[in-house]
Amino acid sequence: MQLFRQLFDPASSTYTYLLADAGEAILIDPVFEQARRDAALLRELGLRLVATLETHVHADHVTAAWLHKRRSGSRIVLAAAAGAQGADVPLAHGDRVAFGARHLQARATPGHTAGCMSYVLDDLSRAFTGDALLIRGCGRTDFQQGSAERLYRSVHEQLFTLPETCLLYPGHDYRGLTVSSVGEERRFNPRLGGDSSPGDFAGYMQHLGLPHPKLIDTAVPANLRCGRPADELASLDEPTWAPVTLSFAGIWEIAPAALEECGRGDVQIVDVREPHEFAAELGHIAGARLIPLGSLGDRATTELDPARPVVLVCRSGTRSAQATVLLGRAGFPHAANLAGGMLRWRAEGRPAVGGQT
């Protein structure tokens, strides 16, 4: 496996996992609101998303599986027992999901829900357990056909039988913990480890006293459709003023060619360099307004229209990236950074006012 990333959604405390080999990637438990972030990372790393995998039908967030399929053609993969509509690959216990020259083995681990599936890397070095096994805990068993008896058996038969050194990556963590191991959880998990018995575990789970997840009435029906929303077009919510892309750093960017092609008629181009740079060898884009970065915060609301798109420009795209963030916080929803700045603009042979030809 050439690449592994653990990503986090703070709203639901959900972990999303990216695994890739030979340019092919999979995402485990992608979150709808984080689809742009994940797509940006894939694009920046030059990866092709071949599949999204679900560990179960979630009750606390909506999956981004459908959205990724719509955008990149990736397959939607989850347990057949989950009963979801729209899956491309309904998994059974023991099935494999390939990416590059590697694969994950699906292991049925019901108990939190009836359709829980854990995924074990082919060399048994990592396992992705969803809510079946958390770090020093586990998922609840009081809804979605949950069963304490089944969960105890699933963990002990399918996860605790892995090598002690196998790293365990949970679906959630609410304390900032990121990874455990089979050996640790066998010894220290207060619900399932040590000398606990099925009866001990059932008694523990019967007295958790947890409220239902706040989003359960929205999330479960949506996830039974693999995240496909009722209003498909509205859910895409992409900027329409130009072909801009979101970077993994969370900054909207526009390529020089896209800026030229969009006509620039309604676009406010703001150069955030210093005055001496504006007239130096790189020159500046025709129609650009000079507002140095240090004064942008004070001048933006009086000199710029927040209802119109703004493209921020500097020498390399670094200062203008900061300016893009600043304008976003100031209430400019259509601000984008010129990728590569004037260096790229001139390197591509695009016209400029002043400077050296």
Image (tube, rainbow, N blue to C red):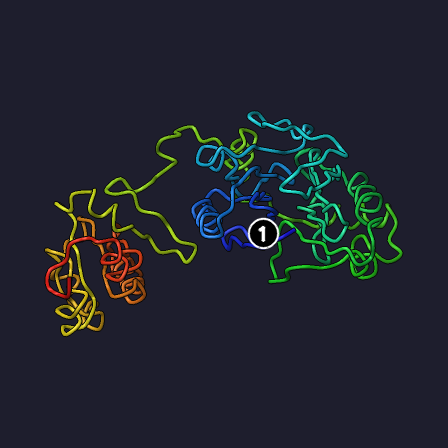
Between 104 and 10, the one lying in front of the other is 104
Count of numbered circles on the image = 1
| Left or right: 138 in relation to 256 | right
Between 165 and 64, the one lying in front of the other is 165
Residue at position x 63%, y 42% in the image: 100
Q: Which quadrant holds residue 321?
A: bottom left
Q: Position of residue 348 (x, y in %)?
A: 25, 53
Q: Secondary structure at mark 1?
A: strand
Q: Which quadrant holds residue 188?
A: bottom right
Q: Residues within 10 Å of mark 1 (few under 14, many from 20)?
A: many
Q: Position of residue 237 (x, y in %)?
A: 34, 39
Residue at position x 51%, y 46% in the image: 47
Q: Is residue 136 above or below residue 293?
A: above
Q: Which residue is mark 1?
A: 15
| Left or right: 290 in relation to 94 | left
Q: Position of residue 54 (x, y in %)?
A: 61, 39
Which residue is at the far front?
357
Q: Is residue 341 above or below residue 105?
A: below
Residue at position x 77%, y 55% in the image: 166
Q: Position of residue 52 (x, y in %)?
A: 57, 38
Quarter in which the C terminus is drawn: bottom left
| Left or right: 20 in relation to 33 | right
Between 137 and 77, the one lying in front of the other is 77
Q: Which quadrant holds residue 55?
A: top right
Which amino acid type is shown beneath numbered disc 1?
Tyr
| Left or right: 248 in relation to 105 | left
